[in-house]
């Protein structure tokens, strides 16, 4: 694989620790990166993703889409020779779990709101 096709990435976790740096092909998808993050996640962390969909990757202030490649998501600073790109990792539980919890907490609420027009 040619040297220019490789991008060096590290992933910054919520507590300031890092996974990486690791070299990836520019053709690697964001979905592939998320799978690697889940498999390499430190075992001593209280908060941990269970599946790749629990992970959001942020680079240059943007949430990255699963179908995009690393090459499509590189910001201008990644073009510097020997540049290391840091992506921030946010662990967010899957929506199915959140909907279940919401149903349990979704009791009917009584509101006493009224309006008077004079």
Image (tube, helix red, strand yellow):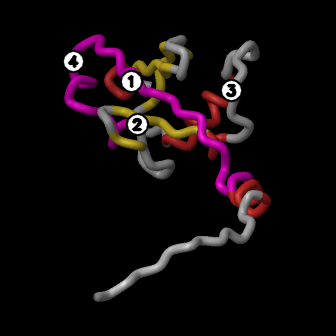
Q: Earlier in the sequence, mark 4 or mark 3?
A: 3
Q: Nearer the viewer, mark 3 or mark 1?
A: 3
Give the labeled residue for mark 3. Answer: 47
Q: Quadrant of the N terminus?
A: top left
Q: Label 2: how many residues lie within 10 Å, few (<14), some (14-19) or many (20+)?
A: many
Disc 4 from disc 2: Cα separation:
15 Å
Of the residues under marks 1 and 4, which one precedes in the sequence?
A: 1
Mark 4 and mark 3: Cα distance apart in space: 33 Å
- Asked whether residue 93 appears in the rendered view, the answer is yes
Measure how far apart labels 2 and 1 are at the Cα level: 8 Å
List the residue tagged with mark 4.
80
Q: Which mark is residue 7?
A: 1
Q: Secondary structure at mark 4?
A: loop
Q: Please give the label number shown on residue 90.
A: none
Kindly state the secondary structure of the residue where label 1 is placed: strand
On screen, residue 4 versus residue 108, left or right, reads left
Q: Which residues are magenta?
A: 71-98
Q: Residue 60 location in percent, x, y?
A: 30, 33
Q: Earlier in the sequence, mark 4 or mark 2?
A: 2
Q: Is 38 colored magenta in this rendering? A: no
- Residue 118's spot in the image, x, y percent? 28, 88
CA separation in Å, label 2 and label 3: 26 Å
Of helix, strand and loop, which one carries label 2?
helix
Q: Assess whether mark 1 and mark 2 are in contact (beta carbons under 8 angstroms).
A: yes
The image quadrant of residue 116 is: bottom left
Q: For the residues marked 3 and 1, what is the alpha-carbon distance in whole angstroms?
A: 28 Å
The percent position of residue 11, horizontal first and vertical second, equals: 49, 22
């Amino acid at each position: 694989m040619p040297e220019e096709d490789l991008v060096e990435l590290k992933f910054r976790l919520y507590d300031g620790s890092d996974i990486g740096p690791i070299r990836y092909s520019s053709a690697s998808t964001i979905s592939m990166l998320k799978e690697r993050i889940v498999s390499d996640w430190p075992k001593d962390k209280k908060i941990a993703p269970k599946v790749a969909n629990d992970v959001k990757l942020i680079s240059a202030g943007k949430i990255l889409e699963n179908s995009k490649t690393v090459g499509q998501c590189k910001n201008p600073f990644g073009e510097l020779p020997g540049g290391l790109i840091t992506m921030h990792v946010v662990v967010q539980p899957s929506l199915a779990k959140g909907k279940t919890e919401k149903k349990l907490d979704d009791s009917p609420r009584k509101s006493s709101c009224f309006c008077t027009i004079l």
